[in-house]
Amino acid sequence: MPREFTPKVVTANALVEGDVVYLTENDEWTRHLSEAEVITDEAHAQLRQLQAETETETVVGVYLADVTPGATGPEPTHFREDFRRTGPSNYPHGKQAELTDV
Amino acid sequence: MYDYTDFDAAFVAERNRQFRAQVERRLAGALTEDEFKPLRLMNGLYLQLHAYMLRVAIPYGTLNSRQMRQLAYLAERWDKGYGHFTTRQNIQYNWPKLRDVPDMLDALAEVNMHAIQTSGNTIRNVTADHFAGAAADELADPRPVAELIRQWSTDHPEFQFLPRKFKIAVTGSPNDRAVTRAHDIGLQITEQNGELGYRVIVGGGLGRTPMIGKVLNDFVTQEDLLPYLEAVVSVWNLLGRRDNKYKSRIKITVHEHGIDDIRARVDERFAVIRPTFTGVDTQLFKEIKAAFAAPAFKTAPTALHDTTYQTDPIYRAWCDTNLATHRAPGYAIVQISLKAHGATPGDATAEQMRVMADLAEFYGHDELRISHEQNVILPHVHKSDLPAIHGILKRHGLATANIGLVSDIIACPGMDYCALATARSIPIAQQIATRFDELKLEHEIGDLKIKISGCINACGHHHVGHIGILGLDRAGVENYQITLGGDHTETAEVGQRTGPGFSADDIIPAIERLVQAYLTHRDGSQETFLQTYRRLGMAPFKAALYDEAQAYAAE
């Protein structure tokens, strides 16, 4: 049996805008965590991260972030990822202002 | 103020041209991120949690109205209409796009500003007392020497790849408002036998391993200053621990080798390099000093201020709290609070920046300062102009009378913006300020400095806050540790931890209990929080923090 693996998404910052992006199943980058590919297999996660890291003209700082399944797609497990998904708490800036479905 | 020479302007223009080309090569894929990152950092561009962040140097915290207006323009044109003033007297923009940054840097160059060496392992922006040139207790204006050091350290070929960043602060007053004892080098202008010189303090710093700086040399003459500083930095450049970034700052080098060993090495190095300084620097210093000549202070009646002070209680409260003593008769130093209750500490909107620029131009000899406490200063204001200034500040949300009080909180950006942060700082500051405003207690409490950092790197100076708050990540939950008794002045001390931390929900009531304990135990209203703490020690505060918390939990 493979050891237990916390589901992950591949995330990074966009090179030009600098904002948070997530990798979808179709190899596209989305601004919505809810659209990200949820990876439940460790080997697949490593492969997806490696693939994403080759896209150096699109994204910066690729890594795997823990998620948990939610009603509308993956949800962050850590508060840092929650801020990355929404934006700062002192102003309605960032994703919470730019996106309507988070 | 210092104006760029043709050399300065050409240097900045060339750096901007280079950076524009570097950005283009990065976008075209000719530079990898690994290649580009050190280049963008040398120009003050970070990648944070939600966006890029551009840190612009405000040398020794001094601005004129034209520069402040340009900062407002950048905020509106390329950011979200505001800027964040930092504890190192810089301004940060939280939302630039990579493609726009070269244009932002060109716009800054139009007003003699840049973002060079605001990041990376170099000598950073030199900071100074924010009352420089105006303070009644000042021996000499620290800005000329800060400018000299800026010119010496900018693009210094030996110091572009130091073991770690290196920060210098200068004060011209015995009352230290520039936190010189928590800098890699702190300089204090002193006098010996009628001659002005410098006390050189090294090895201070906050962060993971807080240290109070030690006196390396009690008196260095003006002629010897630059070679002496060069000797200090080059000794550390060789000894500094490049193997471990947590041990690389000069505070650790001084701690590991001892101040006497460092002094001997500096003296040896100084003897070698002193002859290479031919006196050009002293000549240059004279020219710089002339550029910082004091404005022509006027003599005028202060009756308007005196009458308003007697008749308008809101004005009186603002004067009592936000003004400082000026060296010229009839003048005052105006401190504009960027800490309106519930607002983000250190943030100013573009409109507010323009208002402050206008006030400086019309009433303040065209001078502004940014304080390390994240406020803005009009250093030279005649008292007869104060009622008009107060009226204008009020209309723009800038007349909060809370300088030095419990709601005048230093807070780093924390996890709302910073990629290094382990917890948020800003909402904690907002909630503390709002709570004490509701209690209407802050003038009763008096002098109390709360400083909040969202990680161990201590950008929020929590170690030297009378009450320090450090936000940490404890098993995926924000947790806030409290330190007490820190002091950033000439009697600098690192605060002591009280014990276990508090959750985000519990930290505000905890701070309230601490302040109540102070009010209960103080020896009259003249005794400040810090004095009470020093007299009584930790015990009554610890009891207020933990005994009551346990009592509530048991209910």
Image: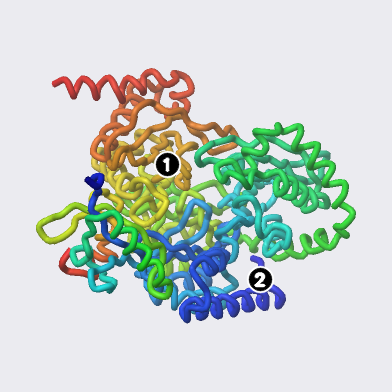
Residue B375 visible in the shown view: yes
Please tell me if label 2 and label 1 are on a single chain: yes
**Residue placed under numbered mark 1 in the picture:** B451
Q: Quadrant of the C terminus of chain B?
A: top left
Who is closer to the viewer here, B508 or B326? B508
Check the image and report above or below for B83 versus A57.
above
Please give the chain letter of the residue carrying mark 1.
B
Disc 2, SS: loop
Q: Quadrant of the N terminus of chain B?
A: bottom right
Under mark 1, the amino acid is Lys
The quarter holding residue B396 reads: bottom left
Give the residue drawn at x 18%, y 23%: B552
Q: Looking at the picture, how far across and down is residue B12, in whole percent? A: 63, 74
The amino acid beneath tag 2 is: Asp
Q: Give the x, y percent position of residue A13.
A: 36, 66
| Residue sitting nearer the eye, B485 or B546 | B546
Q: In which image quadrant can residue A40 be found?
A: bottom left
Q: Earlier in the sequence, mark 2 or mark 1?
A: 2
Query: Disc 2, disc 1: CB below 8 Å?
Result: no
What's the CA distance linking mark 2 and mark 1? 34 Å
